Image: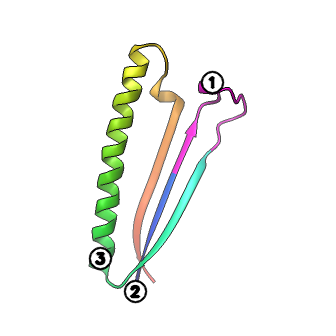
Amino acid sequence: MWVLIYIFSYSVSPAATNDRAEWRLLPTVVFQEFSSEERCKAAKSKIEATLKEAGDKLKSGLDDLKRAGAADPAQIIIAYDVECLPK
């Protein structure tokens, strides 16, 4: 048995919102069991590809906002990790 652990976290700079509190990480953690290492690794690859594609779209959108003077990509932190581990 294998377990896929997926952690996704993001934080928005207080300067970019009406909330003037400190940076806050907002994590999401997901666990999913797989019957084989191959199935786990296939799911991991799909998640990583999807996150890369979403990140590329987000960066492009933020760059457009930066050019318009409305936002800065440095105001957002996004982090993730996807691992397959034996149970």
Number of numbered callouts drawn: 3
Label 2: which secondary element: loop
* Residue depicted at 33% across the width and 56% down the height: 48
Dividing the image into 4 quarters, which one contains the C terminus?
Answer: bottom left
Please tell me the numbered disc located at residue 1: 2
Residue 49: percent from the left, percent from the top? Answer: 29, 53
* Three-letter amino acid code of the residue under disc 1: Ala
Please tell me the numbered disc located at residue 15: 1
Dividing the image into 4 quarters, which one contains the N terminus?
Answer: bottom left
Cβ atoms under marks 1 and 2 closer than 8 Å = no
Is 16 contained in the magenta span?
Answer: yes
Give the Cα distance between marks 1 and 2.
45 Å
Q: Quadrant of residue 32?
A: bottom left
Residue 81: percent from the left, percent from the top? Answer: 44, 57
* Three-letter amino acid code of the residue under disc 3: Arg
Of the numbered discs 1 and 2, the one sitting upstream in the chain is 2
Residue 44 against residue 11 in the figure, above or below = below
Give the Cα distance between marks 3 and 2.
10 Å
Residue at mark 3: 39
Residue 19: percent from the left, percent from the top? Answer: 70, 30
Graded by Cα atoms within 10 Å as few (under 14), some (14 to 19) or many (20 or more), the crowding at tag 3 reads some
Graded by Cα atoms within 10 Å as few (under 14), some (14 to 19) or many (20 or more), the crowding at tag 2 reads few
- Judge left or right: residue 29 versus residue 33: right
Give the Cα distance between marks 3 and 1.
42 Å
- Tell which of 7 and 18 is nearer to you: 18
Q: Quadrant of residue 38?
A: bottom left
Graded by Cα atoms within 10 Å as few (under 14), some (14 to 19) or many (20 or more), the crowding at tag 1 reads few
Residue 50 against residue 54 in the figure, above or below = below
- Judge left or right: residue 76 versus residue 3: right
* Three-letter amino acid code of the residue under disc 2: Met
Q: Quadrant of residue 35?
A: bottom left
The magenta span reads: 9-24
